[in-house]
Image: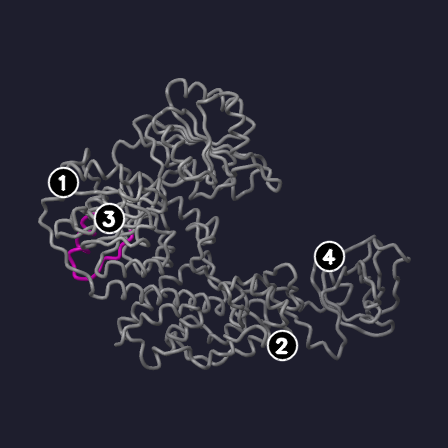
Amino acid sequence: MSRPESLSPLFRSLHSIKGVGDKLAALLTRFFGAPEGQEAIALDILMHMPSGVVDRRRQVGIAEAYLNQIVTLRLHVDRHQPPPRGKLHVPHRVFAHDDTGDIQLVFFRAQGGWVEKALPIGEERFVSGQIGFFNGEKQITHPDYVVEPAQFATLPLVEPVYPLTQGLSSKALGKLVRQVVDSVPELPEWIDAETLAKNKWPSFVEAMRSVHLPEQPAEAELWGPARMRLAYDEYFAGQLTLQLVRSTMTAARGIARVFTGEITERVTHALPFSLTEGQQQAVSEIRADLASPDRMSRLLQGDVGSGKTVVALMAMAAVAEGGAQSTLMAPTEILATQHFKTLKPLCDMAGLGCELLTGKMPAAERRAILGRIANGETTIVVGTHALFQSGVEFHNLGLTVVDEQHRFGVHQRLALSDKGRHTDLLVMTATPIPRTLVLTHFGDMAVSVLREKPRGRQPIDTAVLSIGDYGRVIARLQARLAEGAQAFWVCPLVEESEHLDVVSAEDRFAELQKVFGDQVALVHGRMSASAKQEVMQRFSANELKLLVATTVIEVGVDVPNASIMIIEHAERFGLAQLHQLRGRVGRGSVRSACLLLYKEPLSETAKARLDTIKSTEDGFEIAERDLELRGQGDVLGTRQSGMPGYRLAVADVHRHLIDYAHDDAKALLARNPGLTGAEGDAARTALYLFRRDLAIPLIRAG
């Protein structure tokens, strides 16, 4: 089915709305972030939520208008006092009164006589704005509204306030909003009557009216019925999409894997340690998925260093027992190389062919490896995501493991699953994702969690210090390095920035070189991959004692001997990032330390972040705190990577609705998998409305 005709008014281009010319259309298209080459549409304006409301209903006499209140007064205009010629800094004052007292209206840089026209002497006007005082007199500087008594109805007594951009005034946007809200058609209802009645929710159209054109301030509140309903709608469309993706992924097209137990046993013997309880649990959940005829689609969450790679190896070994191959994909070559180093010796001992495939290989070597993958000699292939783009033919691919999945959206999951038509999918992430976000972004996947750290991991002592103690820090560092320790020193920027008062990695490197000479090196994201790799290798080999870095080391650098992590300007990092960075130490046998250096003054949020990191090492607890302090877009690093951000739902207020939306979407597809009939049409309308139509082709016929 194509988009319902009734939705056309919302999908028309902005040009068709009265008062929108080329310039404004281009501005709004940029502001709403329309996809490349497309223009923003009426729907974008509808979905742009107000951030609050201004209440102008207080209509009183001047005598009862108090400082800083917003009031609407009916005034009699007495006289004008324009500034002397050429004195632009002197304001234009208008003197006015009502039965209870006097007031002045103040306008700066008021040229062209428009003030005189708007406020003619001897006439009455309604004026709305905020009361101020000057020399003991009441005044309103730049009133928000001045209207004639006959036009009083055009003065919005309850006025929504919107996030704006340079060049877009709230008045211009308000006009557009009104036109768009008036054009919203009656839509079929996708929420069942019982839920509506229980929550006292209005229809979609009424909810949009309440939020955009409220008559009472309460109508537009985040926790009011209108906004709750809209947040639920948005979550419902998202959850329905994920459920459709899930049913496509698991649509009985998998292969029930058969295990003999011999390869997994060899791997178990090769491991230098026994699996933790959490790892054993995850392995058995994965084996159950592999044994079932449905395709596996599972997310493996584990904190930094919880041993996800070994769980993946056990899964790959199990698949190998049925004669199928596996591939492990990482986001960068450094990470892929690291996984390979962990896996290769274990695979060799267990008799599994394991190869690393990177972009930099000499052509002949690459051809040889591709040959072994194609004829099935190689069982496990490790590489970057590029593995899949470049004509790699597998003999019989059974399992795809993807590392650091949060960079990896629903589209990619679908694209991947086409490569091996029956392959099972396991994705791993070291970003502990709170349950709400797991539902929001990975509702299509089953989840396994590794909570404990492998045995032998040392706790990390975390301290918080002001950068004012730099001298003490250096003295301590010299002593520790002399004892044979290695350290990371992380800075937020590569080079000095004129906008931010922050010490860059290059400046800090120059300073530290004066003390530590050639024992210190610098690594940052703008270096070529090979230059980075070379510095990392020297650090791993203990030729360097101190590594100054930007956050390129955040994910997956493994140097067991490094036991000190110093993070400068720690107040500029998010919680998840601080946690990831700290996880780079504490990987060897010595007790490790992490030092968070901050610059005064600290904001409340920054203080809360540093306290959280100091007080706990539990990544899941940290992620929950992070969600409270920052909101969901940041926790997953999705603000940059274009994951479906939410426009109507606000996680802090509405997150309890995700569970309902999840259950309702699931129940709907169980009852009506083809989304047929009136119920199905209503649900499809919701998918179009929230631009989840990517999911519509996935709806299975009955």
Please tell me which of labels 2 and 3 falls first in the chain.
2
Q: Earlier in the sequence, mark 1 or mark 4?
A: 4
How packed is label 2: few (under 14 Cα within 10 Å), some, or many (20 or more)? Answer: few
Residue indicated by mark 1 = 351
Callout 3 secondary element = helix
**Separation of residues labelled 1 and 4 (CA atoms):** 81 Å
Q: Amino acid at mark 4?
A: Leu
What residue do we see at 25% from left, 76% from top? 702
Question: Does residue 595 appear in this view?
Answer: no
Picture quadrant where residue 358 is located: top left
Left or right of residue 114, residue 515 in this image: left
Q: Is residue 166 above or below residue 373?
A: below
Q: Which residue is mark 2?
A: 18
* Residue 59: percent from left, percent from top: 71, 69
Identified by mark 2, the residue type is Lys
- Residue 696 covered by magenta stretch: no
Residue position for label 4: 67
Real-space CA distance between mark 2 and mark 1, rounded to the nearest whole angstrom? 72 Å
